[in-house]
Amino acid sequence: MLSIVGCERESGSAAVSRAREIMGTFATLTAIAPDKAMATAAVEAGYARLEDVNRLMSDYAADSEIGRLNRLPAGESLPVSPETFECLQRALEVGRVSGGAFDVTCRPLVALWKSAARESRLPNEEELARVRSLIGTDKIILDAEAGTAARSMYGVQVDLGGIAKGYALDLAAEAMLKAGAAGVLVDVGGDVRAIGTNAADKPWRIGVKHPFQQGIYVVLELSNRAVATSGVQQRFYEIDGKRYSHIIDPRTGRPAEQSPSVTVIAADGLTADAWATVFSVLTIEEGRQLIAGGKTPQLEVMWITGSVAEPIEEKTAGFDSYIVE
Ligand code: AMP
Ligand code: MG
């Protein structure tokens, strides 16, 4: 996804936009504020929050809160920041509502498939069975009063890769508003949170990348919404010439075989990010049924399957209202 930032200026307001590498990807933060100093301060405040999420929740960094949780003796509780607590709590909630399609304890499975791919082989049944016994959101124990997290057994490991980026969009956007921005666009690796309007006082325009080729598939107009895209085309492994998604179906222990590209529009970044991962695990039919069941948050979804020659697109009823080109 690429963000397209208007460069016209409304009089009495300034736009500042800065791109940086962070969270293993590229980010662009844009603030519209009464003057340039305030817009710059807002962008910096946004980046500080992205840094916070990275420092607290990266599962690669052994000294992050998630890194420490993953090494904690079973049954022992770790006091965590309110941010990590909220992200974990909402992740478990998405897990529950999605019937287990979203599962932040998927890390041992992700690791198993990654190491098998490095050795150009598929994991065997024994390895899969052993690792699957470590999976399940019931194995993460949160205590809201104490502000702690624990894991119920040795080997259980958390991976917030499917949700933390979206949560980071929300924390950054909130900090930017607090610093005085009236319009905010936070783009982290193509997942975007848009608040208010752009420099031309119009809804923000965001391009969704084409799943099968270079360039943009559709342009969306968003205000006070977030959009996230997940899918096989984003990141994958190859074993024996076959592509495997980096998204695991926790119900089978195998890489998701669903839609090559899922784009979700929601009210906030965490919701868009987590649910884009959910709909990458579920079949389109399962996804539609789940939405029809009325338990999901308010979402619009676009699934793209098919091939370069013939992309096949399915959307929920309200998705088109965001498309401008
Ligand atoms: P996303 O690109 O937002 O769909 O996130 C994908 C990342 O989420 C993967 O790289 C894993 O770190 C993690 N992940 C994989 N499968 C799942 C799953 N079923 N539920 C939650 N997180 C997952
Ligand atoms: Mg996600």
Image (spheres, rainbow, N blue to C red):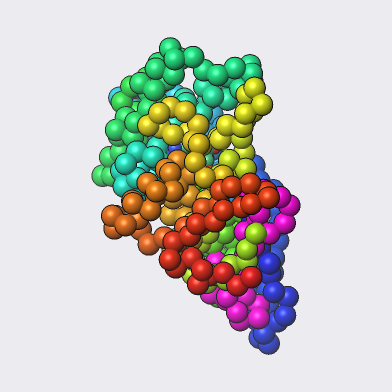
72 relative to 206, above or below: above
Q: Is residue 15 left or right of residue 152?
A: right
Q: Residue furthest bottom?
A: 11
Q: Residue furthest front?
A: 310
The part of the chain drawn in magenta is 194-216
140 relative to 125, above or below: below
For residue 164, say whether it is visible. no
Residue 196 in magenta stretch: yes
x then y, percent, for residue 292? 32, 57
Foreground residue, 224 or 145?
Answer: 224
Is the N terminus in the top left, top right, bottom left or bottom right quadrant? bottom right
Q: Is residue 215 left or right of residue 196?
A: right
Q: Magenta stretch mostly in which secondary structure?
A: loop
**Residue at the spot 43% in from the left edge and 44% down from the top edge:** 283
x then y, percent, for residue 159? 47, 35
147 relative to 59, above or below: below
Q: Is residue 54 left or right of residue 79?
A: right
Residue 38 appears in which quarter of the rendering?
bottom right
Q: Is residue 21 left or right of residue 188?
A: right
x then y, percent, for residue 316? 44, 61
x then y, percent, for residue 214? 73, 52
For residue 125, say whether it is visible. yes
Is the C terminus in the top left, top right, bottom left or bottom right quadrant? bottom right
**Residue at the spot 39% in from the left edge and 40% down from the top edge:** 101
Residue 169 in magenta stretch: no
**Residue at the spot 31% in from the left edge and 47% down from the top edge:** 97
Q: What is the tally of numbered marks visible in this picture?
A: 0
Foreground residue, 227 or 183?
Answer: 227
Q: Residue furthest top?
A: 126
**Residue at the spot 32% in from the left edge and 41% down from the top edge:** 99
